[in-house]
Image (cartoon, helix red, strand yellow):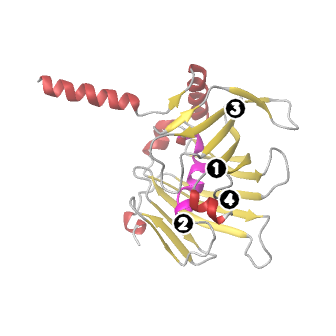
Amino acid sequence: MKFILYILIALSAYAAKAEPDYKSTETKLIIKKMIQAHGGYEKWSKAPSIRFDNVMHNNYHQKEQFAWWIAHEVIDQKMRQVYQDWPMDNATIGFDGKAVWQKNWQKGNPPEFMVHFFYYFVNLPWITQDNNVVLSAVDKFKWPGQEKEFYQIKMTFKGEASVGKSLKDYFVLYIDPDTYLLRGYQYATGYEPFLELMGLKGKYEVFGPLWRTITKYTNVDGLIFPAAFRTMPEADERIVGNHVILNIEIDKPFDYSKAKP
């Protein structure tokens, strides 16, 4: 009986730790309000999969390159296994929970880097609840050209890095003080194969930060996702990427056979 009680206490302690590291009470309050504004955590976490069509126009493509990046992405919510179809490239990439694989992958970005890349951007309000996340004290930020001050919270990572990620990665979240919607963010990556691709390895610890502003939202069964956003090198500067997220679905089971090569 004592042994069972000990196990229950240990499990309770583990469960209590399975949440982000909030650096202040105010941080936790604002993050919880943000998640609620986006439809709440429970419904999102119970979705068997998140699937969407990701369309990006690369404004800085080379003349010989196809400017559009188009992918149908499906992510398992339990283990974050992935399969992606890239119809304009006749390519597929996937992650079966252990290894990343690819077929006919032609993009420069490593497939490991891409499997969760846009999953984070589309689901960022809820990703804040991963237990390897650290959320800073709250600051204020006034976006250039706007009078409103946004809540600013830096999101970093601890423990073991996820596939295609590094512990040097970070986001800086900008949360609307009236609606508590996530209105934009900065992001930076320290994933070494990507730094090497960009010629930055050994020179810089991270690529970025780049800035994102969310320009349109969509309601999917009560969950509020970004439907369109822009990427900029600095806040309110020239646009280097235009993004549209279409056909978001949260109610279909994940086909694990497709996550295998």
Mark nearest the camera among 2 and 4 is 4
Tell me: 137 left or right of 214: left
Q: Residue furthest left?
A: 1
Dot 2 alpha-carbon crowd within 10 angstroms: few under 14, some 14 to 19, many 20 or more: many
Callout 1 secondary element:
loop
Vertical position of residue 186 compared to residue 49: above or below = above
Callout 4 secondary element:
loop
Q: Which circle's residue, 3 or 1, is located before the other in the chain?
A: 3
Q: Which residue is mark 1?
A: 205
Callout 3 secondary element:
strand
User: Can you see residue 38?
Assistant: no
Q: Which residue is mark 2?
A: 111
Tell me: 95 left or right of 110: left
Q: Which three-letter amino acid code belongs to the residue tagged 1?
A: Glu
Q: Which mark is residue 152?
A: 3
Give me the residue at 71% from left, 32% from top: 176
Q: Residue furthest front?
A: 202
What are the residue bounds of the magenta stretch? 112-126
Q: Which mark is residue 200?
A: 4
Distance in Å between CA atoms under marks 3 and 1:
22 Å
Q: Which three-letter amino acid code belongs to the residue tagged 2?
A: Pro
Give me the residue at 28% from left, 31% from top: 11
Dot 3 alpha-carbon crowd within 10 angstroms: few under 14, some 14 to 19, many 20 or more: many
